[in-house]
Image (cartoon, grey):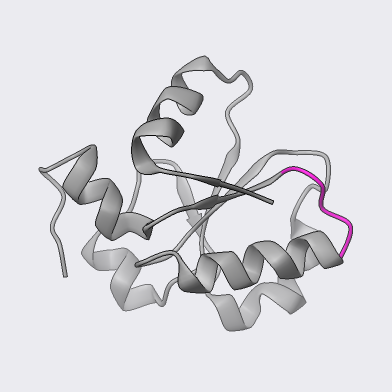
Amino acid sequence: MRDLTPTALKDHLVQTNPLPMLLDVREPWEYQHVHLPNSQLIPMMQIPAALSQLDQEQEIVVICHHGVRSRQVAYFLESNGFRNVINLYGGIDAWAREVDSSLPIY
């Protein structure tokens, strides 16, 4: 698992083709409040049941509010055979503060 800061992830997304899966592991109310475009919501507690929906070969960026839940999910994915996992360091909160100030902060 790699940690990328919001600015490093922004650069990575511009340079990467195909784009990685943006996996948001927050709760639905959090996702409704703010999320990255093209991200997919699978709350943290639903990840074990959703493993078969995820492509082990695709790069996956795991996102949460501050980077704690996403780090736990990233470790879980790695322990289940996923090899190309990135944790958004600081989460959507850091993204809103460092990359896109138009996003709401909660």
At which x and y percent is residue 66?
36, 66
Left or right of 98? Residue 5 is: right
Q: Position of residue 14 (x, y in %)?
A: 45, 19
Q: Nearer the viewer, residue 98 or 24?
A: 98
- The main secondary structure of the magenta stretch is loop
Is 36 placed above or below 106 here?
A: above
Across the whole image, how many numbered discs are drawn on residues? 0
Q: Which residues are magenta?
A: 80-84
Residue drawn at (26%, 59%), measured in percent from left and top?
93
Out of 99 and 23, give the one closest to the viewer. 99
User: Please, is residue 6 above or below residue 104 in the view?
Assistant: above
Give left or right: position of 100 versus 40: left
Q: Residue at x 29, y 47 (%)?
A: 95
Query: Which residue does the image show at 43% across and 72% down from the upper left?
Result: 26
Q: Position of residue 88 (x, y in %)?
A: 47, 51
Question: Front-most of 3 and 79?
Answer: 3
- Quadrant in the picture for residue 23: bottom right
Q: The C terminus lies in which quarter of the figure?
A: bottom left
Q: Residue at x 63, y 79 (%)?
A: 46
Direction right: furthest residue: 81
- Looking at the image, residue 49 sits to the left or right of residue 81; the answer is left
- Look at the image and say whether residue 93 sits in the magenta stretch: no
